[in-house]
Amino acid sequence: MARTFAYCRVSTTDQHTENQIAEIQGAGYDIRGDRIVVETISGSTAAMARPEFAKLVEKLERGDVLVVTKLDRLGRNAMDVRATVEALADADVRVVCQQLGGVDLTSPAGKMTMGVIAAVAEFERDLLVERTQSGLDRAKRSGKRLGRPRALSRQQLTEIVDRRAQGASLGVLAEEFKVSRSAIHRAIKAA
């Protein structure tokens, strides 16, 4: 007999999973407490790299159903979500997403939905890369220096080189200029 599991994820300890659990139960799923998996971890972490999700996957058997409230509970990266759903489908586990009208993502309609979502995500990612590159190019053309702001001014760099030549230690210079020892080392090396 098919068992039903719920996966409820939040990103921070300030957030709670109660609403996700209530939404799943409100949709008519009567899931035992030991089959509700709750996890606090970033959605940017690959699903299979999440400790609780990985334990859940180990418990799942052929014919089981995994319910999530929203697709982003599985992950923020469309490619990871797709790979996760495909891996579960290969194990004959159905994945149901409430946000998408309770569609089984492993069914033909669900696979089509996943394909559209993946295509849109890839399009969005390409647009983001294009806009970012365009902005960087525009900033470079206008003479803006890119990257992290310098921790030390040119005057401070000159002073550091002089003081080091006089025998001041990296630790003393780092403390005096309120930067790390490696920043002092890089400054001397660059000079």
Image: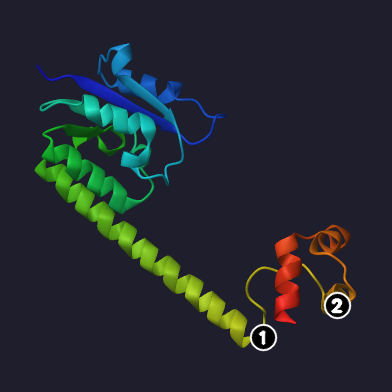
Provide residue 156's location: percent of width, then percent of height.
86, 74
Q: Which residue is mark 1?
A: 143
Q: Residue at x 22, y 49 (%)?
A: 114
Provide residue 45's location: percent of width, then percent of height.
41, 44
Q: Secondary structure at mark 1?
A: loop
Is 37 placed above or below 121 here? above
C-alpha distance separating marks 1 and 2: 34 Å
Circle 1 packing at 10 Å, graded few (<14), some (14-19), many (20+), is few
Is 124 placed above or below 139 here? above
Provide residue 31's location: percent of width, then percent of height.
27, 15
**Sequence-wise, which precedes: disc 1 or disc 2?**
1
Q: Which residue is mark 2?
A: 165
In this view, the residue farthest toward the front is: 167
Provide residue 145's location: percent of width, then percent of height.
67, 79
Determine which quarter of the picture holds residue 129: bottom left
Determine which quarter of the picture holds residue 95: top left
Q: Residue at x 53, y 34 (%)?
A: 12
Task: Give amino acid for label 2.
Answer: Ala
Task: Give amino acid for label 1.
Answer: Gly
Circle 2 packing at 10 Å, graded few (<14), some (14-19), many (20+), is few
Q: Quadrant of the N terminus?
A: top left
Q: Residue at x 25, y 18 (%)?
A: 29
Determine which quarter of the picture holds residue 103: top left
Q: Residue at x 82, y 76 (%)?
A: 157
Q: Quadrant of the C terminus?
A: bottom right
Q: Is residue 37 found left or right of 64 in the rendered image?
A: right
